[in-house]
Amino acid sequence: MKNFFKKYIYKSLFTFFFFFLLSLFFSINKILIPFIVSLFFFLTNSKIQKILTINLIVFIGLIKSFSLFLNMNNTLSKVIYEKHFLYGVRNLDNFYIKDKGDLTSFINVQTVPQNEKIKIKTDRFGFRNEQYNESFDYILVGDSFLHQVRLNQNELINYQLKKNNINSYNASLSVYDISHYFEIIKFFKEKKKFTNKFIMFIYPPNDFISYSKPKKNYHKLMNSNSFYYFLEARKFLNMHSIIKYLRLSLKEKPKNLSSKVKSYLVKKNEMFFYNDYLNSDEKKIFFNREFSNYYKKYLPDLVVIIPSKFDVYCHFILDAECKINDYYKKIISNDLFKNLQIIDATPFLIEKASEELQKNNFLYSLDDTHLNSLGSAYLSKLLVEKLKVEKILN
């Protein structure tokens, strides 16, 4: 009986190890697949288990060695654990190569290799702050416009606000949408008992979609060190990302990628825009009853609308048609948001873009959809004006 129990424990541990190795090749969202395979693995005899495990270890070693010769220098991939499971890599404190603008891959021009480096620091939750504590007056929730992996740490909006004595915490991550924003508010309200103000930043070209199923408890594991150790081990071996990179490299690239972008001259500078974002006036936002009922307890105290690059610069392009993008009305037409305070940053940024054009400066990078350091500084200036001068949340 004792030997049987010992054998059972050994087999269970061996199966868990096999499960971990196999799970490296799957997204966290598909972790059930290696789990089911591991159950069958548990039922096989020890000899087959050893052969399968040794082969898997050798294969992982070969893939990892081969990856050292691949050009996988994408900064965003270094700061999130996985694109389809959006937890930020925690406790970073290093310099990383600044990514090219997100439109450069669609432009048929030769680009100079990017050598500029930016400082990126993350806290114990994987967000871009010095640290987390309970003293913050505001938690900022948003996507890549606040996460900003093309900006230095001190250029981020939370650091700009600190210069004006506004103590804020940046809980934003690239690829987030409104359902993630609500989950962040839920996490801090329930787990951390954060009772101060939440400011939600909405970028209509990405965030204006139909929301149905809530992402229930998406961030529930952010307090779990053991889960983060699992993520960090996955990130170190990086099998899922390497296999995905190899698969995409072998796949035939779509032709006519340039059709995805359009360029205009803005004060003799060629500025690029996503075609999809030229028609963001057609975007709609909708929350069904289940979504609204689930998140009505986790509403932000303030919503800030960030306009698209075209919303701002179409006013300075001779042959462009500026469309009316009534983002504010579209948001408050939903019961979930109808009683919230909302700031539309569009008029303010258009005004500042006009002023800066006189000095040949831009608020958005020419080859990127995001605000640059100057644009981010102006967005923080607008918040300072609203929070400190007009005191809209007091």
Image (spheres, grey):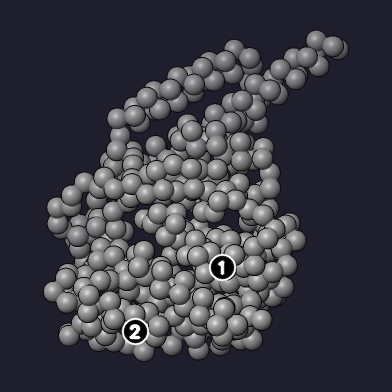
Query: Circles 2 and 1: CB distance less than 8 Å?
Result: no
What's the residue at 57%, 68% (across, down)?
Answer: 166
Distance, label 2 to label 1, CA atoms, is 25 Å
Note whether residue 209 is visible. no
Chain-order first, disc 2 or disc 1: 1
Nearer to the camera, 143 or 348: 348
Expressed as whole percent of the image width and height from the top left, the position of residue 176 reads 51, 61
Nearer to the camera, 269 or 324: 269
Expressed as whole percent of the image width and height from the top left, the position of residue 92 reads 50, 43
Note whether residue 97 is visible. yes
What's the residue at 34%, 80% (across, down)?
Answer: 352
Q: Mark 2 points at which residue?
A: 351
What amino acid type is highlighted by mark number 2?
Answer: Glu
- Residue 258 sits in which quadrant? bottom left
Left or right side of 181 for 276? left
Expressed as whole percent of the image width and height from the top left, the position of residue 127 reads 54, 53
- Residue 217 sits in which quadrant? bottom right
Badge 2 marks a residue whose secondary structure is helix
Left or right side of 295 for 232? left
Q: Name the residue under label 1.
A: 165
Nearer to the camera, 126 or 326: 126
Residue 11's disc is none
The quadrant the N terminus occupies is: top right
Expressed as whole percent of the image width and height from the top left, the position of residue 325 reads 39, 86
What's the residue at 25%, 63% (across, down)?
Answer: 367
What amino acid type is highlighted by mark number 1?
Answer: Asn
Left or right side of 139 for 269? left
Circle 1 Cα neighbour tier, 10 Å, few/some/many (<14 / 14–19 / ≥20): few
What's the residue at 40%, 27% (across, down)?
Answer: 64
